[in-house]
């Protein structure tokens, strides 16, 4: 079964909502991990409205950390939860949103994560998130997929940890002759760094990994990040 899993930092919906809606729809994601989703002032209604406008549904509860998981029409949610991650004094509270889903007989535990700008916190939270994902996936025999804003580049420790436990989908989609070109996600208008990624368990074979097939103007107007979407082939039950 082929499933499309994406990740996207929404920049708190501070940019163009019509452009953001078109970008999310253009991802054609079955499951979308989002960061910087609304957390205050009718946050639940705003999340649901954005998801509905793009043809998706809000799957996960809670607002902690501004993370959430959205699902498309062919996905069934088996379980959804939100976890608070370890508190670091003086830093923003961070969370992990997890949805265990089924699509065409394939089961996945999908998590959305937004790591901190503080180096030790990033590394700790990356390890904590993987442990929580393993715990959520085990009862369902689900393949783990983690999407997020890592807030560092692939050569740095937290990214290396995630890519060591799971596959960096962008790297896994590379040809035998080298890395897939592009992949830069920040800042959206003139991207110079790859700080957003999708990471998948080995049983979820990476078919492709890229961005949204939408106008460049919409990508620049929708958020300060660019989205990433991976097409994964996952064995069915």
Image: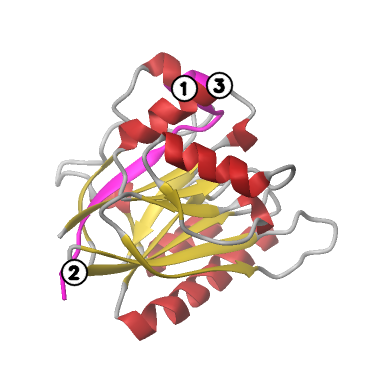
Look at the picture and state if 74 lies above or below 214: below
Percent position of residue 128, x then y: 57, 72
On residue 19, which mark appears?
Answer: 1
Residue 95 image-quadrant placement = bottom right
Which region of the structure is painted magenta? 219-237
Tell me where residue 75 sits by quadrant.
Answer: bottom left
Residue at 32% of width from left, 36% of height from top? 27
Pick the residue in front: 127 or 129: 129
Q: Which of 92 and 106 is in front in this view?
A: 106
Q: CA separation, marks 3 and 2? A: 36 Å
Residue 143, image x and y in percent?
30, 70
| Disc 1/disc 3 C-alpha distance (Å) | 5 Å
User: What residue is pinned by disc 3?
Assistant: 16
x then y, percent, for residue 78: 37, 71
* Residue denoted by label 2: 105
- From the viewer's perspective, is residue 51 above or below residue 190? below
Q: Can residue 130 be seen in this view?
A: yes
């Amino acid at each position: 079964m082929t499933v499309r899993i994406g990740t996207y930092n929404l920049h708190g919906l501070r940019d163009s909502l019509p452009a953001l809606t078109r970008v999310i729809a253009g991802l054609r994601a079955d499951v979308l991990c989002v960061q910087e989703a609304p957390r205050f002032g009718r946050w639940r209604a705003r999340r649901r409205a954005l998801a509905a406008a793009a043809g998706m549904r809000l799957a996960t509860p809670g607002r902690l950390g501004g993370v959430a998981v959205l699902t498309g029409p062919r996905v069934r949610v088996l379980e959804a939860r939100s976890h608070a991650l370890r508190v670091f004094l003086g830093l923003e509270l961070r969370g992990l949103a997890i949805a265990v889903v089924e699509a065409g007989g394939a089961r996945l535990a999908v998590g959305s994560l937004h790591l901190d700008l503080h180096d030790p916190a990033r590394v700790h939270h990356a390890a904590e998130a993987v442990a929580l994902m393993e715990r959520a996936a085990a009862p369902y025999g689900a393949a783990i997929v983690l999407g997020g804003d890592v807030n560092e580049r692939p050569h740095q420790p937290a990214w290396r940890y995630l890519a060591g436990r799971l596959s960096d989908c962008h790297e896994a989609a590379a040809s035998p002759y080298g890395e897939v070109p592009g992949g830069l996600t920040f800042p959206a208008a003139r991207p110079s760094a790859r700080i957003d990624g999708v990471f998948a368990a080995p049983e979820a074979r990476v078919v492709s990994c890229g961005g949204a097939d939408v106008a460049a103007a919409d990508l620049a107007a929708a958020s300060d990040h660019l989205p990433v979407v991976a097409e994964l082939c996952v064995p069915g039950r």
